[in-house]
Amino acid sequence: MTHQKKLVVLGSTNIDHILNVPYFLAPGETLSAHQYQVAMGGKGANQAVAAGRAGANIKFITALGDDPFGKEALEQFKNDGIDTSLIKIVQNEKTGVALIFVNDEGENMIGIHAGANAHVTPDMLEERIAEIESADALLMQLEIPLETIQMATEHAKKHGVLVALNPAPAKPLSDELLSQIDIITPNETEAEILTGVKVDSTENAQKASKILHDKGIQTVIITMGKMGAWVSENNQGILISGFKVQAIDTIAAGDTFNGVLIMALLEGLTLNAAIQKAHAAAAIAVTRKGAQPSIPWKDEIETFLADH
Ligand code: RIB
């Protein structure tokens, strides 16, 4: 049996409370929803689940509250093929929460409360740092304290671990941090916040990519919604189109893309093939409601790719 490369995902877990509404509310407005759903989410957890279901050898570092949601999340992660030994349960704390509106176009608006995610601190990471240092790849997002991301990045970089950052939710990041990232995967809004370039065309996507390359990042992948993903290496970019499907809910589409992308790279796929696989997984996810309920398994991704 060949040795399977090891992925560590470091990030948040949320319980998503989702209201499907006809359109986004205006201030002061009350609106009846078509549907209310409570589902597991959080950008870190979604990416870990996407990688786990796609067949990765994955450990997830996150913090959960000592509430029923935390217990449920822990069980669910095990069922999704994730090694949960590095997860911390925080006493007297609630699991992170996201309140989400989804409109009839499948777009979403999200408000989050960190809860236990705020406890993913450098102190918590200290006891788990050897796992990052011995990994093949580290995948992170921005729903946990930035100091923890900085610490993880420094240790990973020193040990030759591939460092991937999905800079979501958007926030400005220091040049020092960016210089240590190998693969960055912003969407258009996040790319604009990081570079000041409005990514409204492929030409501008390349301008933004150049700025990120100049900061020291080798691989820039800007996800551009229905258009696909702008992929730039050595300052040469191309657009890799996604699959055309009828989207009903885009929650966790980006997370699914990220988890499957890194897993596919660790499997040895080329960057373009890994992006195709990630696009396929995200295309399946947007045809289903909710975050983790929408994330496909390995055989579903393979069937989709064979059919398209
Ligand atoms: O990216 C989607 C996720 O963002 C949701 O699951 C929600 O929890 C927020 O973290």
Image (cartoon, grey):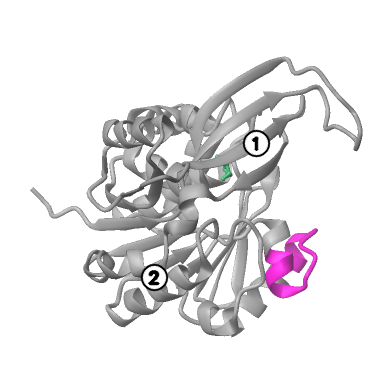
Q: Is 203 colored magenta in this rendering?
A: yes
Determine which of the numbered discs, if any, sits on residue 249 in the image: none
Q: Earlier in the sequence, mark 2 or mark 1?
A: 1
Q: Judge from the rendering whether residue 33 lies leftward or rightward of residue 176; answer left or right.
A: right
Q: What residue did someone put label 1 on?
A: 99
Q: What residue did someone put label 2 on?
A: 122
Q: Residue at x 73, y 58 (%)?
A: 189
Badge 2 vs badge 1, beta-carbon distance below 8 Å: no
- How far separated are the C-alphas under marks 2 and 1? 27 Å
Element assignment for label 2: helix
Is residue 181 something one can see in this rendering?
A: yes
Element assignment for label 1: strand
Task: Say if disc 1 is inside 8 Å of ligand 1.
Answer: no
Q: Pointer 2: residues within 10 angstroms few (<14), some, or many (20+)?
A: some
The image position of residue 151, as x and y in percent, is: 40, 75
Q: Judge from the rendering whether residue 266 lies leftward or rightward of residue 94; answer left or right.
A: left
The image position of residue 60, as x and y in percent, is: 33, 51
The image position of residue 212, as x and y in percent, is: 61, 76
Which corner quadrant of the figure contains ligand 1?
top right
Identify which amino acid the numbered label 1 is placed on: Leu
128, above or below 116, in the image: below
> For this rendering, which residue is in front, 10 or 30?
30
> For this rendering, which residue is in front, 121 or 12?
121
Q: Quadrant of residue 231?
A: bottom right
> For this rendering, which residue is in front, 106 or 232?
106
Q: How many marks?
A: 2
Q: Pointer 1: residues within 10 angstroms few (<14), some, or many (20+)?
A: some
Identify which amino acid the numbered label 2 is placed on: Pro
Q: Is 307 colored magenta in this rendering?
A: no
Give the magenta part as a residue range. Answer: 191-204
